[in-house]
Image: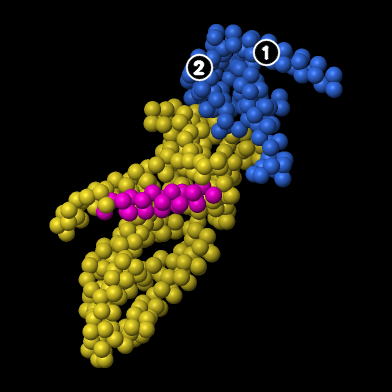
């Protein structure tokens, strides 16, 4: 009953706290009755795929749970922008982002000895609201268009669903292209510097961070290559990406604190080259290698940490052998 | 398209859903004159032609219980704990009134349809 337990855990997470135990007990009873009825109809025990099909028919855990919530708020402007299923998650993510923003800005103002005024808050707060709302509107559209498809299944169910090979192969191709680009940079600096390559060159900081970043790329290739061969090793993706994203976030955080380019000694016009170096460092520090990169990686690490939880729990309980991926489920998601 | 945002089939579906919503409450109350648990209640409704998905039924049962129209009790049956629901005294009175209302609406509609 690992699949049923996983499904119920996913529902439970979104239920009102006070009623969780009671609702889950009742849902469990109903689903067990359905599974038994289906087994009786077929005259044999159900396969994991058949169990999963019954749960899929029951509905997305988040949607099922929200039906028990008395407060079904949503965001709409004549038409539904963010439905009641996603609205609590939207409020949570937006609240978390705004709290982090409002906490970090005064700290950075103090560090840079700048006066604390309202102005530095306006743009980041507005950007957070716009970005988070846009992402959730997009997610809502996807949910309306494909109500039964989860790009990522609930973490509790992910362990029984093998990775689709197309997903691993496309990731492998993308990661290989990025790695080749990184490998070529020392020989063809214009791949980073563009037309300024004659007047500028990469700063010494690249020597310190080049190999760690390369190793992270290679780890990404390794994870995807293994996933192509062993899609049933469902633990590999969340655990390895948690490590890769976590280390990547730390590396990128420190990488961008240094000047990334310096003037090439052979530059003809040194004054112009210095100006170019200043603007290129600003562009790289806030663009290509800007804070978005380490924030994106840190959020990725948190996301995959969430998906690693069931494996860690099993590992701690010594139940490693009980993870049984269901090959018939390939393509279900 | 019947209007700017909805097609005729979609409008029909929405109207059918609205029509069913009220009827389902009466049907659930009527079925629970005898004690049942969720799964058997759902089967009984489906057998009588009023299929309802579990995602709608269980929140509805909870709401009706909160309103005092149903009472429930966890009890073991076939080695499993099940929650049994039945009409409360208040629920019986409300059901009687709802059925009277239903008869009145039915009579009125029949009269209107015959006139047409």
Q: Vertical placement of A133 versus A42: above or below?
A: below
Q: Secondary structure at mark 2?
A: loop
Locate residue B8, reporting x and y percent.
Answer: 72, 40
Q: Chain of mark 1?
A: B
Is A217 part of what is drawn in magenta? no
Locate residue A283, reporting x and y percent.
Answer: 32, 71
The magenta span reads A120-141
Locate residue A217, reporting x and y percent.
Answer: 36, 70
Q: Main secondary structure of the magenta part?
A: helix
Which residue is disc 1 drawn over? B101
Question: Is residue A277 in sight in this rendering?
Answer: yes
Q: Residues within 10 Å of mark 1 (few under 14, many from 20)?
A: few
Is A135 part of what is drawn in magenta? yes
For the C terminus of chain B, the image quarter is top right
**According to the colouring, which chain is yellow?**
A
For the N terminus of chain B, the image quarter is top right
Which residue is disc 2 drawn over? B67
Figure quadrant of residue A50: top right
For this view, does A48 lie left or right of residue B20?
left
**According to the colouring, which chain is blue?**
B
1 vs 2, front mark: 1
Separation of marks 1 and 2 at Cα, in angstroms: 19 Å
């Amino acid at each position: 009953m690992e699949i049923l337990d996983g499904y119920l855990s996913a529902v439970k997470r979104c239920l009102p706290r006070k009623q969780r135990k009671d609702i889950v007990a009742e849902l469990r009873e109903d689903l067990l009755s359905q599974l038994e009825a289906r087994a009786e109809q077929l005259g044999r025990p159900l396969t994991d795929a058949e169990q999963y099909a019954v749960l899929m028919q029951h509905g997305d855990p988040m949607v099922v749970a929200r039906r028990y919530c008395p407060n079904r708020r949503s965001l709409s402007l004549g038409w539904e922008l963010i439905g009641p299923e996603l609205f609590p998650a939207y409020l949570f993510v937006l609240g978390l982002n705004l709290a982090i923003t409002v906490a970090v800005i005064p700290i950075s103002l103090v560090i840079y000895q700048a006066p604390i005024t309202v102005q530095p808050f306006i743009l980041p707060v507005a950007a957070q609201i716009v970005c988070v709302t846009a992402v959730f509107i997009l997610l809502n559209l996807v949910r309306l268009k494909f109500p039964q498809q989860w790009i990522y299944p609930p973490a509790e169910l992910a362990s029984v669903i093998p990775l689709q090979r197309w997903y691993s192969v496309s990731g492998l191709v993308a990661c290989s292209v990025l790695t080749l680009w990184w490998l070529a940079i020392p020989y063809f600096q214009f791949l980073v510097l563009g037309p300024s390559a004659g007047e500028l060159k990469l700063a010494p900081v690249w020597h310190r961070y080049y190999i760690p970043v390369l190793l992270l790329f290679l780890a990404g290739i390794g994870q995807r290559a293994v996933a192509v061969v062993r899609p049933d090793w469902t633990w590999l993706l969340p655990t390895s990406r948690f490590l890769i994203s976590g280390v990547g976030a730390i590396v990128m955080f420190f990488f961008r604190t240094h000047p990334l380019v310096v003037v090439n000694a052979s530059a003809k016009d040194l004054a112009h080259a210095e100006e170019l170096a200043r603007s290129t460092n600003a562009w790289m520090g806030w663009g290509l290698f800007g804070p978005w990169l380490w924030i994106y990686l840190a959020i990725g690490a948190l996301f995959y940490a969430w998906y690693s939880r069931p494996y860690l729990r099993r590992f701690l309980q010594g139940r490693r052998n009980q993870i049984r991926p269901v090959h018939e489920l390939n393509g279900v998601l | 398209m019947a209007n700017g945002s909805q097609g005729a089939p979609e409008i029909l579906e929405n109207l059918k859903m609205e029509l069913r919503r009220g009827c389902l409450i009466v049907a659930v109350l009527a079925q629970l004159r005898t004690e049942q648990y969720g799964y058997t209640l759902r089967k009984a409704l489906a057998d009588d032609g009023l299929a309802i998905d579990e995602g709608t039924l269980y929140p509805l049962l909870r709401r009706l219980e909160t309103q005092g129209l149903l009472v429930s009790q966890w009890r073991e049956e076939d080695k499993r704990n099940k929650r049994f629901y039945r009409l409360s005294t208040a629920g019986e009175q409300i059901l009687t009134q709802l059925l009277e209302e239903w008869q009145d609406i039915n009579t009125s509609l029949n009269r209107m349809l015959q006139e047409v």
